[in-house]
Each structure stands twice: as C-alpha cells, then as structure tokens.
C-alpha cells in the first residue's frame, strides 16, 4: 500500500476518533448510593415555578421527569438543568427489574434543620438527595414507601433543538433564563452582545438566570454560553431581533451535545 494512502487512512481514523471524543466529552459518572423521596401529587403541579427558574417545566420541555436536588447537588444553582439516572435498590418498594429513570434538576430541596438528617431532614447537607416529582418516583417504586434507597449517576442531557432564552427585566436591565441546555445541562457563564456593543459578561442571578445592567434596547442580541461542568462554550448569534421584548422566549440554533 502506498505511503500516502496509509497516511490518508490514518488521518481519517484520527479525525473520526476526535469527532467521537468531542461528541462524548461529557461522560456519565459512576453510580453512587443515596436516597430519594417525592413531592406533590400525580399531576406534578407542585413542580411549576421551581427555584431554578424554569417556570412551567411542562411547556418548557422538561415534562414530569424532574427532581428537586439537595443543596449539595444543586451547588448554588449551578446544578440546575443537570441530568441524572436513578434506580431504586435494596427495598421491597422497588419495582421488579430495577427500572431506571432519567430526571432533570429543576428545583431545590431545601434543608430542614428542625429534623435529623436521617429522620426527616433528608435534604440537609452533606446528603446528596433527590426529591422527585411523584410521577417520576412512581416509575421506579411504590409511592407509599415515602423514601427509598437509590443508586444515582449524572448523565449527559439529551435535548431537541437549540438553546432557549426567556427574557425578563427592562430596557436597562436584561434578565435571561437559559433553557433546553444539552450535554452537561448546566450553565456556568453567559455573555451578551448587542449589535452595537462588544461582549458583556452577565452576572449569575440564581439557577438558570443571568443578568446584565446595561441599555440593550433596539439592538439585536447574541449570546455566548459556557457549561459549568465541561467548560465548553457555544455562541448563539442574533438570537433576538432589535425589537426584542421581555416576556418572550427566543430560540437559538446551537446547543451542547
């Protein structure tokens, strides 16, 4: 075989490996032991308006497979949007076959310092605890158990479509909620660029919301987002038109995969 052909084959192979690594950059973590509870009822209406800022998780694409995480896992809001696989283990309440469910972190399970961490204060630090929506909990165990031992691991988030930006604030204070994040699922940093400005670093408000105290009215807006977990960065150009308005959601054509 000609040397040039060998080099071509080797180059193609290395390129394929590089692409494969890039697509799988965020890997699932190892399984760990914890416990899970549930909140709300079968409608999962209690998940609406959660602490992360997703508003209505149903209309925003997260459905009922969601969980409120203890502060240890939610990490001051930087854990919002992260995805986990959970399966019941070691309990008679577990369904046969040990079904696994994937959930997205959309809320905070706050500490309850009035209760012992092993008797009611399930979300007290340093416990890694998942308070699941009731429909999600019912997919892996009998709900009457109340609390179950589980194995959990963080996994990549698979999202359809691009990033979504919901605007709040006013002409001089832009508050943006970043949703539908793939890959690590989380957001570590956000920048905004008006058609008449350079890149402006936005400060973390809480959860998936970031803010910029600057006059951006009348300018088309682009965004640069860095994942908290992977440090990967994507740029979403011209997400919002010059006549953007608060209360609306704008879709981008890019995402973390």
Image (cartoon, rainbow, N blue to C red):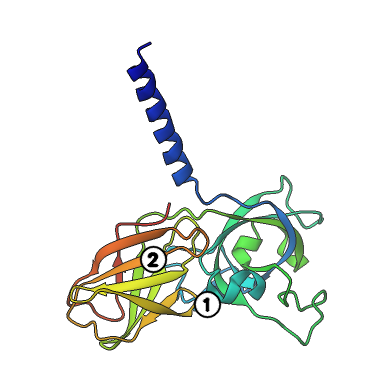
Residue sitting at 38 percent across and 57 percent down?
Answer: 255
The residue under the point 48% across, 42% down is 21
Q: Quadrant of the N terminus?
A: top left
In the image, residue 157 sits, relative to residue 249, either above or below, namely above
Q: Residues within 10 Å of mark 1 (few under 14, many from 20)?
A: some
Task: Give the image quarter of residue 215.
Answer: bottom left
Assign a secondary structure to mark 1.
loop
Task: Between residue 137 and residue 18, name the one nearer to us.
Answer: 18
Q: Which residue lies furthest to the front in this view?
A: 3
Q: Which quarter of the figure has residue 108?
A: bottom right
The answer for how far apart the CA atoms under marks 2 and 1 are is 22 Å
Closer to the N terminus: mark 2 or mark 1?
A: 1
Residue 171 higher or lower than 181, as above or below? below
Residue 183 at x, y = what percent? Answer: 47, 55
Can the viewer see residue 105 in this picture?
Answer: yes
Judge by depth and name the residue closer to the eye, 257 or 4: 4
Which residue is under mark 1?
50
Outermost top residue = 1
* Residue that carries the numbered disc 2 in the rendered image: 225
Which of pointers 2 and 1 indicates the residue nearer the eye?
2
For residue 233, above or below residue 125: above
Q: Where is residue 39 in the image (x, y as percent from the top left)?
A: 64, 73
From this viewpoint, is residue 140 visible?
no
Task: Report the number of discs.
Answer: 2
């Amino acid at each position: 075989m000609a040397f040039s052909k060998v080099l071509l084959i080797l180059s193609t192979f290395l390129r394929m490996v590089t692409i494969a690594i890039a697509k799988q950059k965020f890997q699932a973590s190892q399984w760990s032991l914890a416990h899970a509870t549930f909140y709300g009822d079968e409608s999962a209406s209690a998940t609406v308006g959660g602490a992360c800022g997703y508003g209505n998780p149903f209309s925003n694409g997260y459905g009922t497979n969601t969980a409120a995480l203890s502060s240890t896992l939610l990490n001051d809001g930087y854990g919002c949007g992260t995805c986990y696989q959970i399966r019941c283990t070691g309990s008679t309440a577990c369904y046969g076959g040990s079904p696994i469910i994937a959930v997205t972190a959309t809320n905070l399970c706050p500490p309850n310092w009035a209760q012992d961490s092993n008797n009611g204060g399930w979300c007290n630090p340093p416990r890694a605890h998942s308070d699941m929506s009731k429909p999600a909990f019912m997919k892996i165990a009998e709900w009457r158990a109340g609390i179950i031992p589980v194995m959990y691991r963080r996994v990549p988030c698979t999202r359809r479509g691009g990033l979504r930006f919901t605007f709040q604030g006013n002409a001089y204070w832009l508050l943006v909620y970043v949703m539908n994040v793939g890959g690590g699922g989380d957001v570590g940093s956000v920048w905004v660029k008006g058609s008449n400005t350079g890149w402006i670093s936005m400060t973390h408000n809480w959860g998936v919301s970031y803010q910029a105290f600057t006059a951006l009215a009348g300018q088309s807006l682009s965004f640069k987002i860095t994942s908290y977990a992977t440090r990967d960065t994507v740029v979403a150009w011209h997400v919002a038109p010059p006549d953007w308005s608060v209360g609306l959601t704008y879709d981008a054509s890019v995402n973390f995969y």
